[in-house]
Image (cartoon, rainbow, N blue to C red):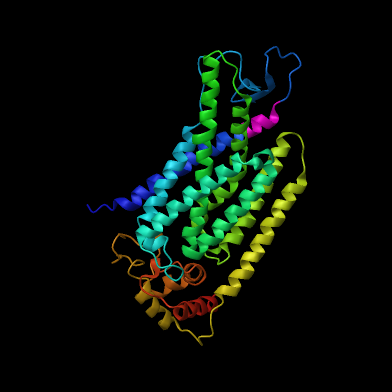
Amino acid sequence: MDLDITPWLNMAIRWLHVIAGIAWIGSSFYFIWLDNSLRPEKDEKDKGVFGALWAVHGGGFYHKKKYLVAPDHMPDDLHWFKWEAYTTWLSGFALLALMYYWSADLYLVDRSKLDMTNLQATGLGLLVLAAGWLIYDGLCKSPLRKNNALLGTVWFFVLLGFAYGLNLVFSGRGAVMHMGTIVGTAMAANVFFIIIPNQRKVVASMLAGQAPDPKLGQAAKQRSLHNNYMTLPVVLIMFSNHYPLLFGNPYNWALLAGFAICGMLIRHFFNRRHKNDVHYGYLVAGAAVFIATMVFAAASQNGFAKPQDTGAVTYTQVKALMDTHCTMCHATSPTYDGFDAPPAGLILTDKAAITAAAGRIYDQVVVAKIMPLGNETGMTDEERAMIGKWAQSIK
């Protein structure tokens, strides 16, 4: 039995990443909802209670309270929400390393932008992740921390600068995926370096019979709120590698900005709604930004992907290009090292299959220019233009 462990490992890590991400996002959304839904109780006897909430679920009633700083005594059982975040980041980084660093020449490096070795590309990627966290953490510790809206705006433009710069040196897919990792790293680091340590300090103060510092809880809550608004853009990037119309666009940095604004507006709508302060304008604005971003994406894509005037292109010419650049992977028995089966189950060895896949070929070869992988076969722009003209002619 010839078992190729790499794709199975990729699937297992990706599955774990999705599961952990659901758990982290679910708990994050729940606690933001809970915090926004707390209401004062008139007969509340406990000191320092900020608010409480009654809820019903699974056939039972729940009564939840939030203390402004901490209760007057430490409970015997205290649950910490941290491993959801840690597991999401660890599995995500493992997936990044397995796909984009181990195979940087195929998925990360674009030699038409910057000719790098795998080691150089990996080093640059790691440097960017560290720089993102250091800049964000510095902003949160600067005077900007007193104004969440202003801090968020500055961080947004920092991320926009990262997205623009990464698109100049990495492949489109690699650049977009690193943007998700920058934000995801900041979110997980918030939990690891700020939220959990601050909570531990509060617990330690209580056990020592001292009054906890309220600033610790305030800083932890601020980082948790930031994570809440960064979640939807990160989720978009998690599955963006399936959509060349996003990462393959030369203005993918601008598209990410538009979709991020859309996600944050929609998240803000729900955060306000949980406080019974409904403003549908945020929801409408989010939808408007999404539509505007989609229109811009289509316009810019048509501009850069429009095939050159290569004259009439026949199937025979396209078949020759497929044989030269594609069938070493996309065949019943691939000859390319590392593939035991055709990627995505796509076989490009006969006319019916090639014609049926014309749209997918156009997206991957002409629009996103990510195929052939790493352009190892040296497909030229003229050849891409020929494939593009043929694909459009049979739509």
Which residue is at the far left?
A: 1
Q: Is residue 12 above or below residue 219?
A: below
336 left or right of 180? left
Residue 32 in magenta stretch = yes
Which residue is at the far bottom?
A: 311
Figure quadrant of residue 52: top right
Which residue occupies 74% across, 18% down? 41
Which residue occupies 68% across, 19% down? 49
Q: Position of residue 339 (x, y in %)?
A: 31, 60
Which residue occupies 50% across, 41% down? 21
Which region is colored magenta? 31-38
Q: Is residue 237 above or below residue 297?
A: above
Q: Main secondary structure of the magenta part?
A: helix
Residue 256 in magenta stretch = no
Q: Nearer the viewer, residue 94 or 7?
A: 94
Which residue occupies 36% across, 63% down? 117
Q: Position of residue 35 (x, y in %)?
A: 66, 30
364 left or right of 117? right
- The answer, for residue 47, to whether it is visible in the render is yes
Q: Nearer the viewer, residue 72 or 385?
A: 72
Quadrant containing the C terminus in the rendered view? bottom right
Q: Nearer the viewer, residue 324 or 1?
A: 324
Q: Position of residue 158 (x, y in %)?
A: 59, 53
Q: Is residue 102 above or below residue 145?
A: below
Figure quadrant of residue 252: bottom right
What count of labels does the image hold?
0
- The answer, for residue 345, to whether it is visible in the render is no
Q: Position of residue 289 (x, y in %)?
A: 69, 56
Q: Is residue 34 above or below residue 390?
A: above
